[in-house]
Structure formats: structure tokens, C-alpha cells
Amino acid sequence: MDGAGPIAGYQAITVTPYSPTIGAEIGNVDLTKPLSDNELSEIRRAFTDHLVLFFRGQELDFEDHARFGEYFGTLGQHVGVKTNSQTTNDPRVRKFHADGQTPRVSGNVWHTDQSCAPMPPMASILYLHTIPPNGGGDTGFASMYAAYDALSDNMKAYLEGLTALHDGTLQFGEGTPKAVHPIVVKHPESGRKLLYVNEAFTSHINEVSREESKAILEFLYEHQKRPEWSIRFRWQPHSIAFWDNRCAHHRAISDYLPNVRSGFRVQVEGTEAPVAP
Ligand code: SIN
């Protein structure tokens, strides 16, 4: 990657920020082996500070992938069935594959994973072994802390106390959950406030008219994806992206079909529902 090198304050791993607001590439660690206590505690700190961590050159098998995820919590199942995602022989690991036969690339709208669940997944860990040969297939990430911080004080005051419905049927069809969450929430570890609506799952704001809800949500969705607090991660074969669903949005960029983009994903269960500050 370009830009500045690793930041100070880490002994076991290297941490090279991707941007001032979100993302860091982690070096000097081998995820095919168990982590030392120091490596794990530094990865946890980097995760809280940078929201999404990238690793390069990690040839993971299912055991390696699941072991890494289980350092952060229990591995869970997706609440819906996506068109280009498939099960594997390990119930903890989902296949993440798209090619010329894929009718709809999963995740190609800004979102946080399964916010339609009463207790959405805390994190997701995507490992790709096969990357389109001519580029493409990047993943966008955006900081919902920075998006919140940049709102006017008047807009912050307006949003605080409002709630929104997150509707899984908008993405995954009947049978997927719906949940009501506050629009401004507090991250359980950093304590920072952030915006918790997304255009994939949020259907409306509960406390205002549908017209007002539509206008406010359209403004927020545009605001959330501004380039000042978003990045584009360029994959290489055997890269990993490990993101915090509680404070980061992401989206797949489906510009590579019919070429193949393929890998596996695990998700770490949440331990608490999003809470208002
Ligand atoms: C997703 O998890 O929503 C998809 C991310 C990606 O494929 O880049």
C-alpha cells in the first residue's frame, strides 16, 4: 500500500493506517498459527482504533479462519440466504463466491451486516483466495463515527432519541428478522457515538412521518458514504478484511463479472444490541 508507514505504539505487530478515519493494514503476524497474548491484545487495540483491519498473504484453511474469528467471540450463522453465498462442510464458514453465473453479487450496497437482527453480528472476517485477474472487486468501508462527528449540532440533537426499523426482508426475503435500533448509538468498547442506519436494511424512522423519514434517511445515506470517511480496499489473493459491524459500513463493488472472485467468510456474534448513548 502507499502512504505513511507503520505507526508507533505496537511491539508485536505492525499497524499501518489506510486513512485517518478508517482502516489499517496489520503486518508481522501469521494467522495460520495461534496468536500470542501480545499479538492478540494489539490486534484488539488496532481493531477498536481503526474499525477494519487488513492482512495480506495469509493462506487460511477453515480451521485457521475459524480460530482467528473465535478469538473475538462465538461464530454465528447468517440470518438470510444470499444468492452467491454457499454453505461449506464447516458450519462456521460460508463460501463467498461470484462469477459469470452469479445473478446478484452479495453486499453491493452500503450496509452493516444483518442490522435487521435484534443482536447483529459484531464482526465479519472475509478471506479471498481468488481475485479477478484484471482488477476490480474492491470493498468499500466507511466510518460511522466520522460520519456522525461531521453532522451539525442541530442534526445531532434531532437524531438523538429517534429509532429506525431495520427490515431483513428488504435484502433476503420473507422469514428474515426485523429489529428496531436507535439512530445514534454508542459503541460498547470505544464509547464513541456513531450513526446506525444503512440503506440496505433501514426501512424508516419510527417517530416521524414517512415523508420526513424518507428525506432524512436519503440525506444520511449520502452523508455516510462521503469520501472523507470512506476507503476502497484493493484485494490480493489471500488477503483478509476483518471489520467491526458496530461502527463501519462496507459494500462490495461488483465491477469484475464474469471473472471469478472467491473466498470464505465467518461472522462473530454480537453480545449486545446497539444502545443509545
Ligand atoms: C459483504 O460482506 O457484504 C461483501 C463484501 C465483499 O464481498 O467485498
Image (cartoon, grey):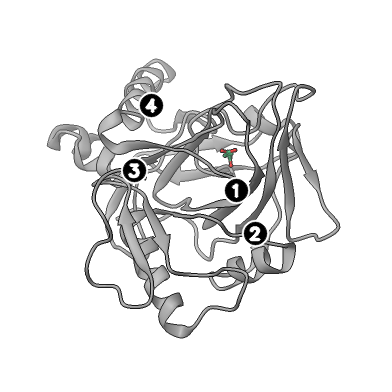
**Dot placed on the residue nearer the N-terminal end, 4 or 2:** 2
Q: Nearer the viewer, residue 69 or 80?
A: 69
Name the side, left or right, on which 272 lies relative to 133: left
Closest to the camera, between mark 3 and mark 1, is 3
> Where on the picture, by quarter, is residue 132?
top right
Q: What residue is pinned by disc 3?
A: 144
The residue mark sitting in front, 2 or 1, is 2
Amino acid found under the numbered disc labelled 4: Tyr
Q: Secondary structure at mark 3?
A: helix
Residue beneath disc 4: 221
- Residue type, numbered disc 2: Glu
Q: Amino acid type of disc 1? A: Ala
Amino acid, disc 3: Met
Q: Is residue 259 above or below residue 18?
A: above
3D distance between C-alphas at marks 2 and 3: 31 Å
Q: Looking at the rendered structure, which numbered label has been put on residue 255?
A: none
Quadrant location of the C terminus in the rendered image: bottom left
Q: Earlier in the sequence, mark 4 or mark 3?
A: 3
Residue under label 1, please give it: 117
Q: Which residue is mark 2?
A: 59
Q: Secondary structure at mark 2?
A: loop
> Residue 96 vs residue 241: left or right?
right
Residue 264 visible within the image: yes
| Residue under the point 28% across and 51% down | 193
